[in-house]
Image (cartoon, rainbow, N blue to C red):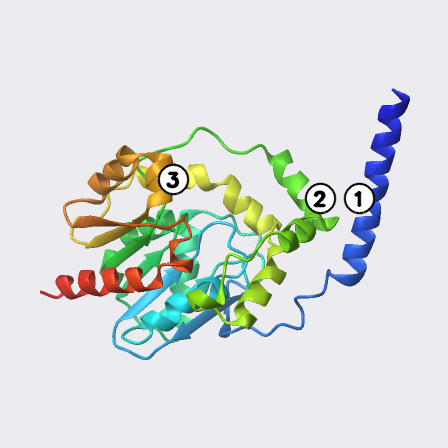
Amino acid sequence: MKFLLIMIGIIACLNLIGFVINKAFYSHELEGLAPYGQMTEVNGHKMHVYSMGNAEKTIVLLPGLGVPLPSADFGPLMRALSKEYTVVCVEYFGVGFSEQTQTPRTNENYTEEIRAALSQCGYQAPYILMPHSASGVYCEYYAAKYPQEISAVIMLDTTSTAFIGKGNVPKFVYGIAKLQQACGVTKLTASLAPPAQKTENGYTEKEIAEYRLFLAHTVNDTFIDQSYLFTANITEVNAIPFPQNIPVLKIVSTATQKSQGTEYQLNHLQRLGPNAASVTVDATHFLYQTRTTEIVEAAKVFLDKTEQ
């Protein structure tokens, strides 16, 4: 028991030291960074919208859950797509350069925030939505509620709304994550891991460095609310029919195919209707970090077909 109390005391002291150091030296490290795009006000809070290109068709990139700086993470894909399309990255509240919000992270609120941000920045529907991972859920809700605003959907290894998981991660787990972040543990582990973004895959040194800075500031109340409501959001979308006239291409990674199985994807494609197709890319779940060329080629072939 004495040994156990000593260990608990040591751990508490180390956490306290980490908290003080992290608070003194790193809590304001993001304040000097400039947003890549424009900040627009949505429901009283600033949202970051970043764009490239100036073509007739507009592709809207929507980030997956927990991506700390989407505008940097999507960099190479945006540059490649912008050669033929206007491409816009919307950073949700609580993500990247966007501010936090206390508005519940529901499908409806995400949809209305996306619409407001795009409209206020001068982009006009119809859009081609390109969601990654969790954003596929909000994308389906958007398409179901405003089908006239969506000309096509290209899903980047998105979450299947044909499958509903069991429950949520207990809230105390998020509390532990916030504590680890506040004590500098998150920053330490992030600095030890090799960067997911590499210059040989088209990333700039600026994008790599700033993404790594944001890694240590990912967990906030807005992100926690998004995570906690995610199962409920899937359940809601599952009960809403997807518009059968909207063409959909789902680009699936081999990593997800292996971990989830073929039924996971087939059931999702069946739910999306007869105008849904899929291609598989040999990559991790973050397929756009390494397979930009394959994504752009698949998107172009798909979008060209939708015009025929």
Q: Is residue 61 left or right of residue 8?
A: left
Q: Cα distance, mark 1 to mark 2?
A: 9 Å
Mark positioned earlier in the residue sequence (1 or 3): 1
**Residue 11 spot, x, y in % from top left:** 81, 37
Return the residue nearer the eye: 164 or 126: 164
Q: Earlier in the sequence, mark 2 or mark 3?
A: 2
Whole-Å distance between the Cαs marked 1 and 3?
A: 37 Å
| Between 53 and 198, the one nearer to me in the picture | 198
Task: Name which residue type carries label 3.
Answer: Ile
Callout count: 3
Residue 111 picture location, percent across and down: 39, 55
Q: What residue sits 18% from the left and 63% below the top?
A: 301
Q: Is residue 255 visible?
A: yes
**For residue 254, which quarter of the picture?**
top left
- Of the 4 image quadrants, the one containing the N terminus is top right
Image marks 1 and 2: residues in contact by CB distance under 8 Å: yes
